[in-house]
Image (tube, rainbow, N blue to C red):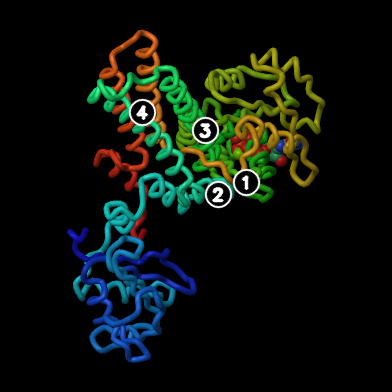
Amino acid sequence: MKLYDTVAAIATPIGIGGIAIIRISGDKAVEIASSLAKTKSGIPLAEAESRKLYLCDIYDNGRVLDEALVTVMRAPASYTGEDVVEINCHGGYVAARLVLDAALTHGARLADAGEFTRRAFINGKTDLTRVEATADLIDANSRLGAQNAANALTGRLAEKISALRETLLDLASEISAAADYPEEIEEIDKKSFEARLREVKSSISKLISGFETGKILRDGICTVIVGRPNVGKSSVLNALAGVERAIVTDIPGTTRDVIEENINLGGISLRLLDTAGIRESLDEVEKIGIQKSLENISSADLCIFVADSSEKICAEDLKIVEELRGKNIIVLLNKSDKTEPDVSKYADELGVKPSDIIVTAAPKDAPTRGIDKLCEEIKRRFLTGEISSEDVFITSEHQKMSLTAAMLSIDNMLSGINSGAPDDLLFVDLEDAVTALGEITGETVQEEIIDRVFERFCVGK
Ligand SMILES: Nc1nc2c(ncn2[C@@H]2O[C@H](COP(=O)(O)OP(=O)(O)OP(=O)(O)O)[C@@H](O)[C@H]2O)c(=O)[nH]1
Ligand SMILES: [Mg+2]
């Protein structure tokens, strides 16, 4: 499929580095590259062997820009399925930009964000699960997140969805054969039909229940640390991060803005947000900081409430805990090096379960306490069960929505079978389920969903 113009972009991040890659894709890719790159061996690029590296000088208007390795990948054996040329020039801020500008001058258009992958999708080189996995892998911020993305990228999720879709298509063809040729084909065996349907349902339900894990693998656990001023929130952040990330002083109101730190927790990413201590304040800047603290609570996966266990619980503490009701919350009784806190008394006063409380200390220049326990508790809450290197979890809302829609249609069919519904009604639900599963791989997807998937991509991918 070659409906498009030829596009080009820098596929690597701009900055100091050994290599930058300029990717050109489309009908005129080789022609445009030929007007820039002259192979050292004298072979015209138009005659270059596909997928072989050629050392070239890159020129623009007779002026040499760089010395680069150039690969021609002829359609359809390329990333996009079109003719692609990749120029591996030197990294940095200037060389790649000049080479790209030269390609644009010679007739290429600057590629939109995700356009190379979108072309690959349109040309059937990839399916929508792999497209989403590509974005997940690029954005991955943890080892297990990258592993999950790589599993989906190599087709594990697509295979699962396609197998389920195939089973449903088989069932559909059995129904329609029985309806079309009632004399030759016996009525469908409802018992075996139902059994196969239940198998598909259980696989779908497993995939849906893996969504929470998939989301954690992809985005990490968004954790907000809240509490009154001076209780030790920033000290806890620093203890978890293992570095002096946030300023710690004995002046209440030290932290005013939200401070973010990403830490690795057993292969997943813990995105910690240290916030301004919440209190009634007249200071304009502090007030904005407090507002931000409150806003972050609503979108967090986990709220760590820090209290100073060397002081009595006060109205301000209770007010903050009230803000956290209904959220996933862990209470830290901090500064336990000063006095040993009575956990059950605090649990009563704060109205939380004793099992949600961890006794901690994060004093300056002295050993910490309870930080390991905090990490274990977070892992226990968010990583239920071992994640094997073979596992693949869905990561996007759209995948979950389509699976839920397929599940609904299957439930309709199951109750239809029980109530003796006619085959043509079952057929309608089967078609809906097949369509819903096709939305995940991209076989039956609407443009709007595709647009949403590609919104996440950067230029050059
Ligand atoms: N003894 C002791 N001191 C602590 C502990 N945790 C924090 N501190 C001290 O308490 C003071 C306040 O600590 P921070 O971490 O800045 O407190 P915060 O909650 O971030 O305060 P704000 O940013 O003002 O809201 C500092 O002097 C810390 O060294 C602890 O566990 N034990
Ligand atoms: Mg602070």
- Asked if the residue at tag 4 contacts the one at tag 1, i.e. Cβ–Cβ closer than 8 Å, the answer is no
For label 1, the crowd category at 10 Å Cα-Cα, with few meaning under 14, some 14 to 19 and many 20 or more, is some
Q: Which mark is residue 171?
A: 4
Distance, label 4 to label 2, CA atoms, is 34 Å
Residue bearing the label numbered 1? 267
> In screen coordinates, is 152 left or right of 236?
left
In the displayed structure, 154 sits above or below 413; it is below
Find out whether the residues at labels 1 and 2 contact each other: C-beta distance under 8 Å: yes
- Residue at horizontal 47 percent and vertical 38 percent from the top: 394
Outermost residue toward the top? 419
Of residues 415 and 392, which is closer to you in this image? Answer: 415
Looking at the picture, which amino acid does disc 2 mark? Gln
In the depicted structure, whether residue 119 falls above or below residue 172: below
* Residue drawn at (75%, 26%) of the image: 310
Q: Which residue is mark 2?
A: 147
Q: Quadrant of the C terminus?
A: bottom left
Lower sequence index among marks 3 and 1 = 3
Say if 113 sits above or below 161 in the image.
below
The nearer-to-camera label among 3 and 1 is: 3
Q: Residues within 10 Å of mark 3 (few under 14, many from 20)?
A: some
User: Distance between the Cα atoms at labels 4 and 3?
Assistant: 26 Å
Q: Position of residue 431 (x, y in %)?
A: 29, 28
Looking at marks 4 and 3 on the same chain, the residue that comes earlier in the sequence is marked by 4
x%, y% of residue 267?
62, 46
The residue identified by callout 3 is 210
Q: Is mark 3 within 8 Å of ligand 1?
A: no
Badge 4: how crowded within 10 Å, few (<14), some, or many (20+)?
A: many
Marks 3 and 1, how far apart in space?
Answer: 17 Å
Earlier sequence position, callout 4 versus callout 2 = 2
Mark 4 element type: helix
SS for dot 2: helix
